[in-house]
Image (tube, grey):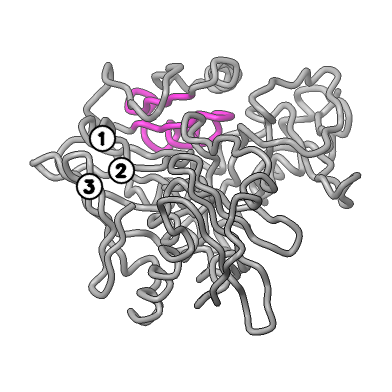
Amino acid sequence: MMMPAVVEADAVRLREAMTQSLEANGVLADPAWRMAVATVPRHRFVPGFYLPAREPGEHGLTVWEPVTADADYGRWLAAAYSDSTLITQFDDQETDWAAPRVRHGGAPTSSSTLPSLVLRMWADADVAEGHTVLEIGTGSGYSTALACERLSSADITSLDVDPSRLKTAAEALHSCGYTPTLAVADGRFGYWPEAHFDRIVAACSFRAVPSTLIAQTRPGGKILLTLSGWLYGYARVLLTVAEDGSAEGPLLPGTVSFMSARADAAPAYGNPAHWAAGLPERTRPARHGPERFTASSAEAFHLRYLVQCAVPDVQLMSLGENVVLVDIVSGSAASLAPSASGWDARESGPVKLWERVEEVLDAFDAAGRPGPETFRLHVHGGEQRLRHPRMTVTP
């Protein structure tokens, strides 16, 4: 491995280059955040991570190559100071970075989020001097370090549900002189010992807004989090908490996704063929096809979340050319099969899944296909409702 003095010298040069790039892209409008990025040594928070290989492996699975300073110093340091998300853990399992192995597929469960998104989150949450902040999802600790540098360690509390991840992050933070309050805790329940907070920012996604986070936010305080679900629809929302304990705020524009809080991860649904076998033979022409919310477009990304609000327990899969939706809570299922005129739908169970999806798509079209920033989320008394002047969806 390179001598520490050499690493630090190279890191200063690359860190300044990354800072200038982020500034040129309009990410660092605030001089205080620019100073934080130029100061915090990201490489200390990512001693090892995975990068995707250029070509997929067998069965089309992504091949993940481990990257460390010992194995490839140049690639490691360059990636550490790139505007990239660096995967640090798969399937909740720690890697032995002294002897890491190539991985084929797997579900990322921890990462160092790309710096531009980290900064966007802090900026969107309107974090400023004097605010007490709860960060949910410490991860590598890099985002926490930026907040400590920008504000003060005394004002930052950061949680992670994974004790190994938090231990590694704590060591990196303390080695850099940052001393925030750290705790192994489930972010859905916030952290009462340090409440109340002026800002809560989550680096993971939730199926619904946890009422405990609202209870731990001061009136006038803000909560920035990502909502997701088993359909993998995502929406970011910035809520302001009122005196009566309710919270309200807009969905934010853009296509941002975060890993689910572990307790909110999609459950296994079994064999798609078993679900499809229980569907009736009778079909009907579908008014809309699944590509409306599965295409690679900003509108489809937004629509996927709106559809998910209508069918929150649904999961989607492919079975040959067919698209199958299953709801393991109600036992309902639906399938879409391509036809000469579009798609044919079949449905079974107490919930007509595709009918509900079509109702959302019809309402969306009738409302003029509004963007996410035109919706507002209201949360009160354990209920949340997504509203738009021309359509309403209940998540």
- Specify which label sits upstream in the sequence, 1 or 2: 1
Q: Position of residue 49 (x, y in %)?
A: 73, 33
Q: Relative to 18, does residue 94 appear above or below in the rendering?
A: above
Residue sitting nearer the eye, 343 or 178: 343
How crowded pointer 1 is (Cα within 10 Å; few <14, some 14-19, many 20+) is rated as some
The stretch of residues the image draws in magenta is 134-160
Q: Point out the image quarter for the N terminus.
A: top right
Look at the picture and state if 214 lies above or below 176: below
Neighbourhood count class around disc 2 (C-alpha, 10 Å): few under 14, some 14–19, many 20 upward: many
Give the residue at the far left of this rendering: 244
Residue 104: x %, y % from top left: 83, 37
SS at mark 2? strand
Q: Earlier in the sequence, mark 3 or mark 2?
A: 2
- Badge 2 amino acid: Ile
Q: Which mark is residue 379?
A: 3
Residue 2 found in image quarter:
top right
Q: Which residue is mark 1?
A: 211
Which of the two marks, 3 or 2, is nearer to us in this view? 3
As measured in the structure, the alpha-carbon distance from the residue carrying label 1 to the one carrying label 2 is: 11 Å
Based on the displayed image, in which of its 4 quarters is residue 351 positioned? bottom left
Q: Secondary structure at mark 3?
A: strand
Given contact means CB atoms under 8 Å apart, are the residues at marks 1 and 3 in contact? Answer: yes
Q: Is residue 160 visible?
A: yes
Say whether residue 38 is left or right of residue 151.
right
Q: Position of residue 241 (x, y in %)?
A: 19, 44
Dot 2 corresponds to which residue? Answer: 223
The CA span between labels 1 and 3 is 8 Å
